[in-house]
Amino acid sequence: MTRLSELARFLVKQPKGILAADESNPTMDNRLVSIGLEGTAARRKAWRELIFSTDGLSEYVSGIIMYDETVRQESQLGQSFVSMLTSFGIVPGVKVDTGTEHLPDSDGEFLTHGLDGLSKRLSEYKNFGIQFTKWRSVLNIGPNTPSDDCIRSNAKRLSKYASIAQGEGFVPIVEPEVLMDGDHSLKKCYEVTDKVLNIVFSELSKENVKLNSMILKPNMVLSGRLSDKEDSSEEVAVSTLECLIQNVPKDVPGIAFLSGGQEDSQATSNLLRISRKSREISTPWELTYSFGRAVLSSALYTWNGNMNFVRNAQDIIINRLRANSNARVNNPTKI
């Protein structure tokens, strides 16, 4: 087993999850504004330090995905955040795509960019102590979307990124997200996710990406946020697992679900049911979570920039992580 395959297996090892704390500066600023605070570098840093210094974090978190700014920041005590996480036994990772651009001649579709200069940036991240990376593509479901061109173009870039990352000594997280936005049915989400994953793994094969040294970060199969239908966790679990079984090779060590804007409890309930169902049918991969908002949103509102509420916010974070880690090992009595 190679170093990268061992690291990939460590990142998806039970009972832990991979925490997504990789919001871009504009996205993080928008979230700060939503709770009545101005988005500044100092506040972003304070929020990330609150997360990283949560007592017991390493009990439930194997790795944390960071944003470029955070990789370069230090704690109040002068320790780099990367070094801080490493000292806790948490693997530091970083988001390496640089956002999205409109896909030409499309119906409002997006193409993720960031390949230019990627090898150089990865070399720099290696010097910081980063060990894994993430690239996210976004696909909207609409009357005419996602188009074949959008799916294929994003899959090619995801696969090229993964190949470059492995070549530079990193475990790549591959995240082809089919968004919850819209009023589409669960069946439509299944059809699109099925097609997306099929094309992604076809492109990964063309780029000779080592499947045993990567992690897939997909969406769960769900009805759209604006749909009148409220999916049961059983429906989500059955559809999600069927889609994965049809498309994800057994060589992939683990699948880390994104929360995608689900409510905290909804994401946990769906994860629990998926975990339970996967054991019933003996799926070949570790199934875990890589949530961001479903772990951190309530804590952000509780903190609200007030240092007197740091511990309260940290308690929320650890409780959400504990609930999701228990869900992934099918332990509902502790959720």
Image: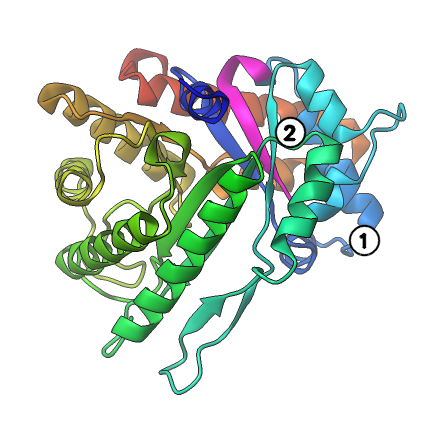
Give the label on residue 40, or none. 1
Q: Pointer 1: residues within 10 angstroms few (<14), some, or many (20+)?
A: some
Question: Which residue is drawn at the image coordinates 24% and 50% (left, top)?
Answer: 222
Q: Pointer 2: residues within 10 angstroms few (<14), some, or many (20+)?
A: many
Horizontal side of residue 172 vs 215, given as left or right:
right
Amino acid type at image mark 1: Thr
Horizontal side of residue 271 vs 102, given as left or right:
left
Report the span colored magenta.
58-67
Q: Secondary structure at mark 1?
A: loop
Q: Is residue 63 part of the magenta span, yes or no?
A: yes
* Of labels 2 and 1, the one closer to you: 1
Question: Which residue is drawn at the image coordinates 16% and 61% (left, top)?
Answer: 188
Residue 72 picture location, percent across and down: 79, 40
Residue 75 picture location, percent across and down: 83, 29
The quadrant in which residue 190 appears is bottom left
Judging depth in this view, the residue of 110 and 53 nearest the camera is 110
The quadrant in which residue 290 appears is top left
Residue 215 picture location, percent across and down: 39, 35
Query: Dot 2 corresponds to which residue?
Result: 313
Q: Secondary structure at mark 2?
A: helix
Horizontal side of residue 69 vs 115, given as left or right:
right
Task: Give the quarter of the figure containing the N terminus.
Answer: top left
- Magenta stretch, main secondary structure, is strand
